[in-house]
Image (cartoon, grey):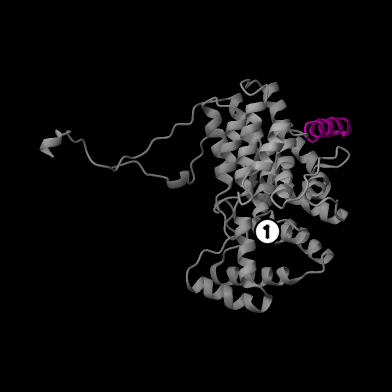
Amino acid sequence: MSDEIKKGLLGIIVDETEVSKVMPEINSLTYRGYAAQDLCAKCKFEEVAYLILNGELPNKKQLNNFEKQERKERKLSKTLLEDIKKFPKKAHPMDVARTAVSIMGLEDKDTKDNSPKANMRKVMRIFAKTPVALAAFYRSRKGQKIIPPKNNLSFSENFFHMCFGKVPDKEIVKAFDVSLILYAEHSFNVSTFTARTITSSLSDIHGAITGAIASLKGPLHGGANEEVMHMMNKIKKPENALQWINKALDNKDVVMGFGHRVYKSGDSRVPTMREYFGKVAKIKKDKKFEKIYDIVEKVMIDRKNIHPNVDYPTGPTYHLMGFDTDFFTPIFVISRITGWSAHIIEQHAANKLIRPLASYKGNQHRKVLQLNQR
């Protein structure tokens, strides 16, 4: 009898982590023991980034030093800025993110040093520069002048400033901060496992994060928030939603933004993001996507008992904020860099090369015949 094969490593525990856990008993995703929704209510993104990377929430002095360090590292090299201007205007921003991190690896003086201190220095550079690189491409591909970062703005405020030339209403910034907190970390998902697998060969952190970005790009992972917006744009208006979703289910089409490998009775991040989606819709005086959201969600639960995941409310929220649809997953990247980095550091601390086995099902042993005998 052959060993049971667990496709997709379903249910397999491959390592230990202290970074995050889904806790069904309190219906919550926790970071270092703190419920994500509590962090959203009481912290800004920089505090959560510090927590994920350092294990504890910062005091005022620690947060101030962390913010100073992040802001000091925002400036891009002239080489990277020039490269961004030359990138194809139709390139997917996820490919830009991946390439930009690779270029940072070429430039970083600590690239070959995998010591804990060097890795943390590199983390801060990648964390600070990646949103700046993406915002530069956001402007460049539209033929607009690239706006330099401002060191008196928060992480989220600066991203808005660099993309749009202005910082929006505080409630919009808070909603964006909340989305970053909810996207920051999620245990051994496919991109995080990719980062840890690359790290396990003692490769460098830029390489591990580059691989994680490539993994996140897929529509079955991070790209789902983009697919949600494409779906809503196809539906167009609330009056079409009921017929559209019923037809999609009748045709057995995949409906993006629903279901999750870990959550079976609803993604614990959804209620918080749904609340802020509503706040943004109210500020923007646009309830259309909320109405579509509610109709599609009800049908999916009633007919399939499948609940939404966090990508479902996040997609239309980013749309209402003014971001292009293909920038939704890159926003996910600038947040998840924190989680990936914490896992990379954790992998280095107790490393073992990740090398699973496969069950061979090809041809049995055969002898090679000479060409004239075949």
Q: Tell me the residue at 58%/75% (across/down).
A: 244
- List the residue tagged with mark 1: 315
Where is residue 74? Give x, y as percent: 78, 35
The answer to whether one can see residue 214 in this image is: yes
Where is residue 276? Give x, y as percent: 78, 59
- The three-letter code of the residue at mark 1 reads Gly
Our reading of the magenta stretch's main secondary structure is helix
Where is residue 351? Give x, y as percent: 55, 25
Relative to residue 162, is residue 293 depicted above or below?
below
Q: Tell me the residue at 57%/72% (across/down).
A: 245
Q: Tell me the residue at 84%/42% (across/down).
A: 154
The answer to whether one can see residue 345 in this image is: no
Q: Tell me the residue at 24%/41% (across/down).
A: 363
| In this rendering, position of residue 75 left or right of residue 192 | right
Quadrant of the image containing the C terminus: top left
Relative to residue 279, is residue 361 depicted above or below?
above
Q: Residue furthest left?
A: 373
Quadrant of the image containing the N terminus: top left
| In this rendering, position of residue 136 left or right of residue 224 | right
Boundaries of the magenta span? 57-74
Q: Quarter of the image holding residue 101?
A: top right
Where is residue 3? Give x, y as percent: 34, 41
Query: Element type at marker 1?
Result: helix
The mark tally for this picture is 1
Q: Quarter of the image holding residue 79?
A: top right
Give the class, few, some or many, for how many residues have Cα within 10 Å of label 1's Cα (few <14, many ≥20). Answer: many
Queried whether the magenta region covers residue 71, the answer comes back as yes
Between 240 and 148, the residue placed more toward the observer is 148
Q: Quarter of the image holding residue 193?
A: top right
Queried whether the magenta region covers residue 188, the answer comes back as no
| In this rendering, position of residue 38 left or right of residue 364 | right
